[in-house]
Amino acid sequence: MASSDVQSKRVTGTGSVAVGPARIRQIQVLTTTGTPRLTITDGSGGATVLDLDFLASDSHSVNIPADGLRVSDIYVSAFTNITAMTVFYN
């Protein structure tokens, strides 16, 4: 079985990443001061699929194991003290 190509999208705030159904494979985050936090849900108002706290003023790479996190829509519901995030999905 062939897998689909991995794509990426840069995000700078909350809301839909607007890529449709996807499997999240990796996330890279650039944080600022304070207490950085990222929460991703399965669409707007959906179940939380990823909720992470980060160290301040650093870059972070989060690899998602196996087949990734399947969502109907990648929706960023919390984007606290984060400059930008790049999400890798297929």
Image (cartoon, rainbow, N blue to C red):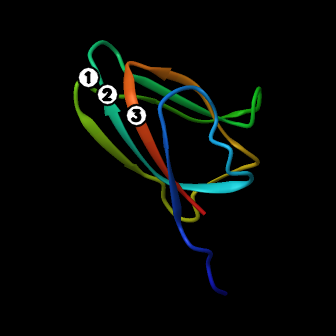
Image height check: is 71 above or below 5?
A: above
Q: CA distance from mark 2 to mark 3?
A: 7 Å
Measure the C-alpha gap from mark 3 to mark 1. 13 Å
Camera-side residue of 90 and 54: 90
| Mark 3 or mark 1, earlier in chain | 1
In the image, 38: left or right of 53? right
The x and y percentages for residue 69 are 61, 52
Q: Is residue 30 left or right of residue 5?
A: left
| Rendered image quadrant of residue 21 | bottom right
Q: Circle 3 sits on which residue?
A: 84
1 and 2 marks in contact (CB < 8 Å): yes
Q: Residues within 10 Å of mark 1 (few under 14, many from 20)?
A: some
Q: Label 1 vs label 2: CA separation?
A: 6 Å
Disc 2 residue type (three-letter): Thr
Instruction: Specify the amino acid type for callout 1.
Output: Ala
Q: Which residue is mark 1?
A: 56
